[in-house]
Image (tube, rainbow, N blue to C red):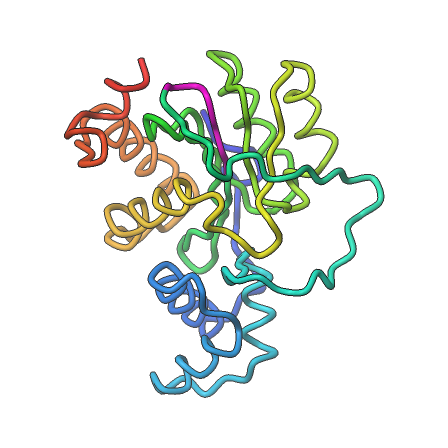
Amino acid sequence: MNVSKGSLYYEPVGIDPYSLELMDLIDRQFTESPFYGSRRLTAWLNRQGYPVNRKRIQRLMRLMGLEAIYPKPNLSKKRKEHEVYPYLLKGLRIQKPDFVWSSDITYIRVGRGFVYLTAIIDWFSRYVLSWRLSNTLEPAFCVEALNEALASSKPEIFNTDQGSQYTSKDFLAPLKEHGIKISMDSKGRALDNIFVERLWRTVKYEEVYIKAYQSARDAFQSLKAYFLFYNNSRLHQALDYRTPAEVHL
């Protein structure tokens, strides 16, 4: 069904209503201003009448998988078993479908809780090749999306951020088996993966923010209809008002 078992039977627990409200506000502001870090988001929330401290916002941002877009000192330690690859797309001209694919993860509010959405997109055509929902950030749902996309085609280069889902052996193995070059964003540079960032903005404003998903099943059904529309009916100005499917196929 294109949805992880854990998401399908998801029962949100342990998130208080005020934190969920803060997460929704953070999600909307971060979509508008992805360069906002925890300090600016804390100040912005305080100005909006939400008295919170920075530690709480940092915790919620980690829970949501958010990181501000700006160069920072590399203070994090990578797991020894995880591999990181250089960014291969700087200055690269992308002139055909299935040359570069990329993937990312975003937060989606569901009833009294939330789930994570991942998608794989073709850079040239903006075509969404696959997507999955999950209630955890374990790599499995990203691997499922990758395997579905690779069942129909393969790119020359696959680009992601340096998140643990994408540096895991389970995710990298199919890419290596298909001889695909692996590219990863510079640390703290989400704009290296600009087309996925634009996809999230489109999905949030045209679908997620105007719906009130009450369950993971509701989210799945609604997102399924939206991605069908996005791929096959939505006209893109950057594609000379063609659909992603028309350009990709």
Q: Name the image quarter holding residue 171.
A: top right
Residue 134: percent from left, percent from top: 53, 41
- Is 114 positioned to the left or the right of 63 in the image? left
- Is 148 positioned to the left or the right of 226 in the image? right
> Viewer-proximal residue, 85 or 171?
85
Taking the spot 41% from the left edge, 55% from the top edge, the residue there is 109
**Position above or below: 2 against 135:** above
Taking the spot 50% from the left edge, 60% from the top edge, the residue there is 69
Residue 59: percent from left, percent from top: 60, 69
Q: Which residues are magenta?
A: 96-103
Number of numbered discs overlaid on the protein picture = 0
> Viewer-proximal residue, 165 or 21?
165
> Viewer-proximal residue, 26 or 79?
79
Residue 230: percent from left, percent from top: 26, 32
**Position above or below: 209 against 178:** below
Which quadrant is the C terminus positioned in? top left
- Is 247 positioned to the left or the right of 3 in the image? left
**Position above or below: 8 against 214:** above
Residue 17: percent from left, percent from top: 45, 71
User: Residue 68 in magenta?
Assistant: no
Which quadrant is the N terminus positioned in? top left
| Residue found at the very far front of the displayed protein | 91
**Position above or below: 193 against 76:** above
- Is 233 positioned to the left or the right of 57 in the image? left
Taking the spot 37% from the left edge, 19% from the top edge, the residue there is 96
